[in-house]
């Protein structure tokens, strides 16, 4: 008997039409009795495991429970379907999220599924470099869903928030499909454009501010509100403004060494394009506090 089968507890069967199997008090199996059955029927009991109905019907409650246990152990690993992932992302809302955010939302939106994954794989081993766990199963399911276009996987890993107790120093960030596209900087030349030989081009926006992953991690933490003037693009432009925001790198470029790795929470701040331009307009660049002091 597997770990997940062992902790699946069924209510005592009385004469009712419904029997539930639970893990830690959360219903993961429902067995219903056909109220029009006769004692000669073979289809008296119908079984739902993680909200999905088994094809087979059963004559005896013991047979139904045995089938439920077997199906539960098998289905826990495959229950993170595209529809379920989309449902959980909808509960998170239209913002970048890391794997921990998704797991928190999964525990609220589909507690039966999250408990099933813990029962199947164990709760320990959060993060990379540890034994396979329910957390690993979720991360791998998201990765597979990203390959099918259900969501976008942002490049690179970023430092895990200290209060997450993730078990790994880094964590992956995700967005809904096409939900966090690169934001063009109006005063920045196109990387694909060609220029006359000898032309001098001044680029004031560094690559850390252009990273989709770094921007996502920053805005996931601080929100999509300008730290300079408080601009909210959704409040101003509606849905067209959703997810639009620059991020500003707090460290002057001359202080950045070759081995430097950006920390999106410590080193970046959400900033609107106008405030961003004012910060970089002259050297030395303004701090966000100095910018706030001149905003009217």
Image: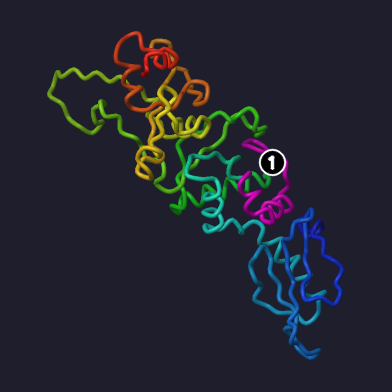
Residue at the farthest top position:
284
- Asked if the magenta segment contains residue 96, the reply would be no
Quadrant position of residue 152: top left
The majority secondary structure of the magenta stretch comes to helix
User: Does 93 sit left or right of 50 as displayed?
Assistant: left
Q: Which residues are magenta?
A: 104-130
The one nearer the camera, 223 or 168, is 223
Whether 252 is drawn above or below 29: the answer is: above
Please give the name of the residue rendered at 68% of the width and 45% of the height, measured from the top-left corner: 133
Quadrant position of residue 241: top left
Residue at the farthest left position:
196
Whether 175 is drawn above or below 202: the answer is: below
Q: Position of residue 61 (x, y in %)?
A: 81, 76
Please give the name of the residue rendered at 46% of the width and 34% of the height, measured from the top-left corner: 216
Within 10 angstroms of label 1, few (less than 14), some, or many (20 or more) residues? few
Whether 177 is drawn above or below 157: the answer is: below
| Secondary structure of residue under mark 1 | loop
Q: Position of residue 248 (x, y in %)?
A: 41, 23
Please give the name of the residue rendered at 75% of the width and 87% of the height, measured from the top-left corner: 37
Q: Position of residue 240 (x, y in %)?
A: 35, 43
Q: Which residue is mark 1?
A: 131
């Amino acid at each position: 008997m597997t770990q997940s089968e062992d902790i699946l507890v069924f209510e005592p069967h009385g004469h009712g039409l419904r029997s539930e199997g639970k893990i830690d008090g959360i219903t993961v199996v429902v067995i219903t009795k056909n109220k029009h059955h006769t004692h000669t029927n073979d289809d008296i009991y119908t079984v739902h495991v993680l909200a999905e109905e088994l094809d087979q019907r059963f004559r005896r409650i013991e047979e139904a429970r045995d089938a439920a246990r077997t199906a539960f152990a098998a289905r826990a690993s495959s229950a993170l379907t595209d529809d379920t992932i989309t449902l959980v992302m909808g509960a998170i809302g239209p913002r970048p999220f890391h794997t921990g955010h998704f797991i928190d939302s999964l525990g609220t939106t589909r507690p039966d599924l999250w408990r099933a994954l813990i029962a199947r794989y164990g709760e320990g081993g959060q993060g990379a470099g540890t034994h396979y766990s329910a957390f690993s199963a979720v991360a791998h399911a998201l990765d597979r869903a990203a390959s099918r276009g259900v969501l976008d996987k942002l490049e690179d890993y970023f430092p895990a928030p200290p209060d997450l107790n993730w078990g790994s120093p880094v964590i992956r960030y995700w967005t809904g499909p096409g939900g966090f596209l690169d934001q063009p900087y109006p005063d920045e030349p196109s990387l694909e454009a060609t220029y006359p030989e000898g032309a001098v081009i001044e680029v004031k926006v560094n690559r850390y501010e252009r990273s989709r992953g770094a921007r996502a991690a920053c805005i996931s933490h601080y929100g999509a509100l300008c730290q300079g003037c408080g601009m909210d693009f959704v409040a101003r432009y509606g849905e067209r403004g959703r997810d639009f925001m620059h991020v500003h790198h707090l460290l002057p470029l001359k202080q950045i060494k070759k081995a430097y790795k950006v920390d999106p929470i410590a080193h970046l701040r959400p900033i609107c394009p106008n405030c961003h331009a004012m910060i970089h307009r002259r050297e030395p660049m303004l701090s966000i506090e100095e910018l706030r002091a001149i905003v009217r």
